[in-house]
Amino acid sequence: MIKFDNVSKMYGDKAAVDQISFEVQEGEFFVLIGPSGCGKTTTLKMINRLIPLTSGYIYFKEQPISSYKLDEMRWNIGYVLQQIALFPHMTVRDNIAQVPLMKKWKTGTIDDQVNRLLDMVGLPHAQFRDRYPSELSGGQQQRIGVVRALAADPPVILMDEPFSALDPISREKLQDDLLRLQSEINKTIIFVTHDINEAFKLGDRICLMNQGRIEQIGTPREFVESPKSKFVTSFIGKTDIERLARDCVTKLPFDGRYPTVDAETPVSALYSLLAEHEQLNVTGADYLGAVTRPSVFEVLSKGGTV
């Protein structure tokens, strides 16, 4: 669906994105992650030509993005921002209807689509379609931003840290809603975040970037079980300081073939041991159980605080 072939973006003599190549499959939830300034948002914005690439090729449906008319291409790629930027003088219905109107959809078709999408994201259309943005909470406004990106039924959705400004409860609820919605609509979603927990929860695959280059692409499980560099291990470990071995315990009998770790050992310190051993025995005052790769992965993928 989307393919990067040796793509770079230069600002003077500095490479914001440095010769990256990857492919996003149709229907995949693909997450771009990395520290600030790593190039993830630049990568996202090059897809719909908000930022022009310097060299290489980006393909959309097997054609270079440069071969599409700009408005035609953007109509086929929905875009959700951190700053939702709803038009304050327009109702929810009119905010959502903008791209369908540009594509000259019939009024009845637009209204049916608005109603259907509002209902899908838990905002009953009879209650919300005639409200104004100022009458909505932050979480409700962000749902409208998602619906607006979906309104013209594009095959691809780009999402640039859409939930980062929300409180933790609203953020987790919207993550859950997005997963449920994706199971129904099966779009190709490319999602930027700086939060490894969010990436693990949402992504089918994750692309970790650093200084404009790709450090690793893989499933959440592959990141946990087979980190490809010290940077990958370190980046994952930054979120695991409060996650301890005891929180990943699964009820398995003690097995003397495997190493024993203390219950207060940070999860980030377990990665190298779990790369060599199928499980680790966990002890506190007494034997508590075992840590396995799946049990660590389950804790990380839930994104909870432990």
Image (cartoon, rainbow, N blue to C red):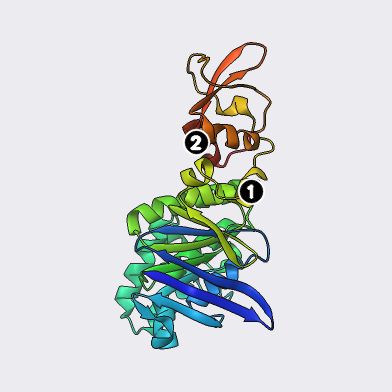
* SS at badge 1: helix
Question: According to the image, label 1 marks what residue?
Answer: 230
Q: Position of residue 240 (x, y in %)?
A: 65, 39
Q: Secondary structure at mark 2?
A: helix
As drawn, 1 above or below 182: below
Quarter of the image holding residue 68? bottom left
Residue furthest to the top = 286
34 with respect to 56 (left or right): right
Q: Residue at x 69, y 38 (%)?
A: 241
What is the three-letter code of the residue carrying label 1? Answer: Lys
Q: Residue at x 49, y 71 (%)?
A: 79
* Residue 217 appears in the figure: yes
Task: Give neighbour class at mark 2: few <14, some 14-19, many 20+ (Cα, 10 Å).
Answer: some
Which badge, 1 or 2, is on the more N-terminal residue? 1
* Left or right: residue 110 compared with residue 235: left
Q: Note whether 188 is above or below 278 in the view shown.
A: below
> Considering depth in this image, is 143 or 251 the residue closer to the camera?
251
Kind of residue sitting beneath label 2: Glu
* Label 1–label 2 contact, CB within 8 A: no
Q: Residue at x 37, y 73 (%)?
A: 152
In the image, is residue 240 above or below residue 137? above
* Residue 96 in view in this figure: no
Quick one: label 1, few (<14), some, or many (20+) residues within 10 Å?
few
Q: Which mark is residue 73?
A: none
Please state the horizontal and vertical placement of residue 275, each as a whole percent of the image: 53, 36
Residue 298: mark in rendering: 2
Question: Looking at the image, is 253 positioned above or below residue 193?
Answer: above
Number of marks: 2
In the foreground, 138 or 153: 153
Quadrant, the N terminus: bottom left
Structural distance between the alpha carbons of marks 1 and 2: 22 Å
